[in-house]
Amino acid sequence: IFAENGAFVYGIDISDESVATAEKRLIENGYGEKSKFQVMDAEKMTFEDSTFDVIICNGVLHHLDIELAYPELARVLKPSGRILCIEALGHNPIIQLYRKLTPHLRTSWEAEHILSIPMINQAKKQFNIVERKHFHLFSIGALIFHGTFLFKPVLFVTNLLDKIFLKIPLVNRMSWQVIFELSNKK
């Protein structure tokens, strides 16, 4: 999407297979000249200081040691840059039970490092602004009805409930996912 809209896109992953897949997709879609993907450790990036205007971390941080990742992200971000992070949250006991019942879907490291609000707030050591928006509290229950005629109406109602309840502090910690923005680096 970013390449499609004019940005030059850099991508990194520790997996050479993931990098090859991403490169192939961009080339197939005509964006090979507008992108570069590399095998790289996100905790020890080889990019110059203040390289990026925007950094997207989509489901990445719970795979990393955030004590190493946050300073490294701050290092490669330009002073006026922004980081957008999309992560699962680890506070909801029902979602945590699901994770325990499905250990084959994630690594043991990943399961133990699903983000919490205090883990997100650790970014305040490197950034002056940490803003959060929570998603999917009641709406994940609509998945039970996926593939039936009830799915769309149930999803509509549960999305309305999410809009109301996810504005409440502490209740919002029970959400499945959070998007947070890091900016104004120190």
Image (cartoon, helix red, strand yellow):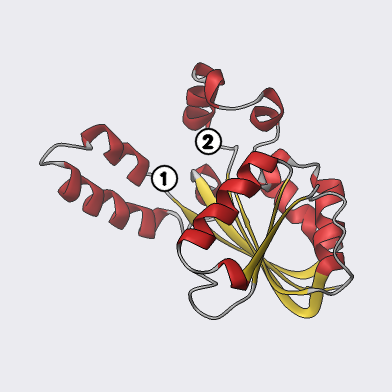
For label 1, the SS is loop
49 to the left or right of 80: right
Among the two numbered marks 1 and 2 on one chain, the one whose residue lies closer to the N terminus: 2
Q: Residues within 10 Å of mark 1 (few under 14, many from 20)?
A: many
Between 41 and 97, the one nearer to me in the picture? 41
Judge from the rendering whether residue 142 lies leftward or rightward of residue 64; answer left or right. left
x then y, percent, for residue 111: 64, 28
Which amino acid, by three-letter code, is at mark 1?
Leu
Query: At x 54% / y 28%, what residue is drawn?
Result: 96
Find disc 2 in the rendering and name its residue.
Answer: 92
162 or 54, nearer to the observer: 54
Please give left or right for residue 148 compared with residue 123 in the image.
left
Residue under label 1? 137
Mark 1 touching mark 2, by CB under 8 A? yes
Question: In the rendered image of this protein, does residue 65 appear above or below residue 9?
Answer: above
Above/below status of 79 relative to 103: below
